[in-house]
Structure formats: structure tokens, C-alpha cells
Image: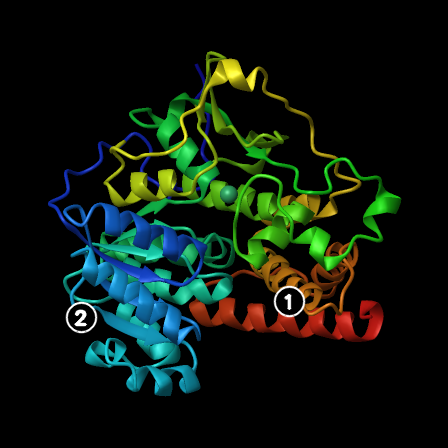
Amino acid sequence: MSRLRLSCDPLYHIGRRPPVLSEPVGVVLLGATGSIGTQTVELAERYPDKVRVLGLSAGGRVDELSNLVARLERAGAAEAPAVTLAYDDSHRRAREDARLSRNLLPSGREGLLELAALPGADCVVNGLVGAVGLEPTLAAAKAGRRIALANKESLVVGGDLVRRAVVQGGADVIPVDSEHSALAQCLAGRDPDEIESLTLTASGGPFRTLSAAEMSTVTREQVLKHPTWEMGPKITVDSATLMNKGLEVIEAHVLFGLPYSRLDVVVHPGSTVHSLAVFRDGSVMAQLGAPDMRVPLLYALGGERHLDLETERLDLAVLGELHFEAPDPERFPCLRLAREAGEAGGTATITLNGANEAAVAALLDDTLAYTDIARVIEGALEALPAVPVDTLEDALTADAEARRVAETLIKETFGA
Ligand code: MG
């Protein structure tokens, strides 16, 4: 029987028996005040015997960071953890804060990279938003950490770089994205040769049933209303354009090593089935559950084991039915653009991501219409042909170029 070939070495160790962790696991939390960050803090509060937070980063929300540290210390899940803030003015304010000033690292990129490789930590939860998450992922990988990765942009922008750093540092990447965690769970104990294809489920976002004409007049507020998951604004916009699923297809390619032709997407509005693996005999494994990000987070933090968690239990009889449909590439062109960029490789996925981040920022600023997001990204991909990526510098240059081209398009062609 012919072997089904993987198209690259999988970043995730399919079939590997997870290591037994000594508890508590020392955790560094990047993006502590975001959705992933605060849910990690909740888990640490509940399981201080399992999770000990050694460091936290935030953007500019000094008071929120201080409150998170207070909560962790009250629960016995931290003791004067190292902290850093992205912005200098916030960092100055943190110096005046009794809790944050005890163990304050430098601000900005320097502090973030120091935190990502913090001595004594076992696991780094990367809950940063956007391509800014790549360098900390590389730092954590080179330091040999277990990386609970929620920042999909790390893999979209620097898939090959992360793979190299993981090998170099003897690190481990455990996906926290719910679909990829679902796939990791479906593939537990399997051989890569057994996999025929993987299917990612997509909620379809808030505009699943709108016509193309109706989509052209949606407002920023409508874009920010996700039907099933509660998340930060960037990923919520990405879910409305289906770019989130596009980025996740690229993420799945890097994590599991399958060619794009064997990575499928199906729209599943209820978000009950989190993804599915199809095996060579036609057998399909799916992972189901109520949509709750704490499940994939705890699975990653707990060394890929199913630990006790009080969550809503799935009642299939109450649910009654599961609904699936094919995604519409006409109304959701971002999915097609992501797949094409993935196939093109090199800088194409960086251009896709950088242009998307610029377009999403413009939509959140109310200077770009929802339907123009895909047009900006397509314009950037046309203007910047793909070239190979060998170094971090190549990736950062391509990212800056993509943003520059996208911002020009937003200002001169599409902007309101
Ligand atoms: Mg996801």
C-alpha cells in the first residue's frame, strides 16, 4: 500500500505519549489581560497545586495586570511573578504599583523575550494577538519550553522558523486553538501514516446567512458580534470574514504536516464538533464539547491529559441535531486567499497575515468596510510576489512590507 506523504515535518508530535509532568507546572503567560490570558488565570486560581504562574505580560492595562497578580497570589498560584508591559508609559506606571514593581522586567520587545525564556519555567502560554507573537514563540522554543500556543500568527508568519527553533531547543508545541487541540486529541496515539485528511470546523461567523449585497452594508458592531465564541476583537473580526479559518488551515498545515489538498473546512454553526480527523479506512474521529476555551487550555497546561474541569456538559438529546454546510468561497473570499497563500508558501502567508492585520485595525477604527478587508489582502498579495523565507529578518521585512502596501491601499483606494 502506498504511503500517504506528509508535505513537511509536523511541528506537533503526532502519536507521541505525552510526558508525565511534575506539578505544579511553572507557567509564563504572554498576553495576560486578553481572553486566553484571563482564562489561564482562572485555571491557575482553581488549580494552584497544578499551575504556578511565574511571569505575565500585558500591553498597556496596568491596573488589570496588577489585579490578575493579586488574584493569583490570593489563590496561592503565584508569588511576586515577573511582569512586563508593552508600552513605556504603562511601564512607568507599573513602577508605581506596589505589586508590579517587585519584579518588573524591561518594557516592550526586550521584556517580552526575556519573559518568554524565563529561567525555571516549564510552559509558556502564548496568548498574544498577531504577528508580534512570533519572536516570543521563537525565544520560548530555543529555551526548550513547552509552548501552549494560542497565537496562530506565529505559525502563519514563521512556520519554518518555529520548526527549526523547536528542534534546536528541544521544545514542544501544544496547540490551544480549539480546532487544533481537537485534532491533537483525535490523533493521540496514532501514526502520521494513518491520517488521510483533517477537517476543521468553522462557526461561519455572524454573516453566514447574509447575501453578498447585505454583507456590503454591515457595521463594525455587527462584525463584533460572534454567535458562539467570546473572544478578543481581532479574532472576532477574523471569524466574521472566515480569515480566522484560513489562518487555521495554514496553522494545521504547519502543526500536522499535511498538504493543503488534505486539509478541509466545513461550516458548523453550533461549534459543538471542534474538528475531525479522517483515517485511511474511512473512519472519522471527532472531538466534541461545549465551546469553552478553558478545555483546550487545560489540556495543553495539564500535559495533554483530560483533567477535572467544571464545564457545561454536552447533552446530545437536548441538542437534537448537528448542522453542517460547505463554506461559500464567493461570499467569504478570505478562505480562498489563505489557502492560495499557503500553497504559494514563502512570504505569501506573511503578506496575507500582515495585510489582514492592517485591514482589521482599519475596520476597528471605522476606516474600512467589512467587504473591503478581502480586497486589501488580495491587492497586497498581488503587489508582493512570494519569495522564500530563510531568516527572522526576512519574515519581519515581509511583514512590514505587507502592512505598508495594505495601509496605502486602505488610504488611497478603499478607505472611508
Ligand atoms: Mg480556533
Q: Which residue occupies the foreground of this view, 129 or 220?
A: 220
Question: Relative to 332, is 299 on the left or the right?
Answer: left
How would you rate the neighbour count of disc 2 (Cα within 10 Å): few for under 14, some for 14-19, many for 20 or more? some
- Kindly identify which residue carries mark 2: 80
Q: Residue at x 74, y 60 (%)?
A: 382
Question: Relative to 306, is 150 on the left or the right?
Answer: right
Q: Which residue occupies the foreground of this view, 369 or 134?
A: 369
Question: Relative to 99, is 290 on the left or the right?
Answer: right
Q: Residue at x 59, y 36 (%)?
A: 202
Where's residue 329, x and y in %? 75, 38
Residue lying farthest to the left in this orientation: 22
Q: Is the residue 298 above or below the residue 63 in the image? A: above
Q: Is the residue 284 above or below the residue 255 in the image? A: above
Q: Residue at x 43, y 73 (%)?
A: 61
Assign the C terminus to one quadrant of the image.
bottom right
- Kindly identify which residue carries mark 1: 361
Say how the picture is coloured.
Answer: rainbow
Where's residue 342, x and y in %? 59, 48
Asked whether disc 2 touches disc 1, contact meaning CB atoms under 8 Å apart, the reply is: no
Q: Visible in this render: residue 345?
A: yes
Helix, strand, or loop for circle 1?
A: helix
Please name the amino acid that badge 2 sits on. Ala
Please name the amino acid that badge 1 sits on. Ala
3D distance between C-alphas at marks 2 and 1: 35 Å
Indicate which label's residue lies in the foreground, 2 or 1: 2
Q: Which residue occupies the foreground of this view, 21 or 77?
A: 77
Assign the N terminus to one quadrant of the image.
top left
Q: Is the residue 11 above or below the residue 396 in the image? A: above
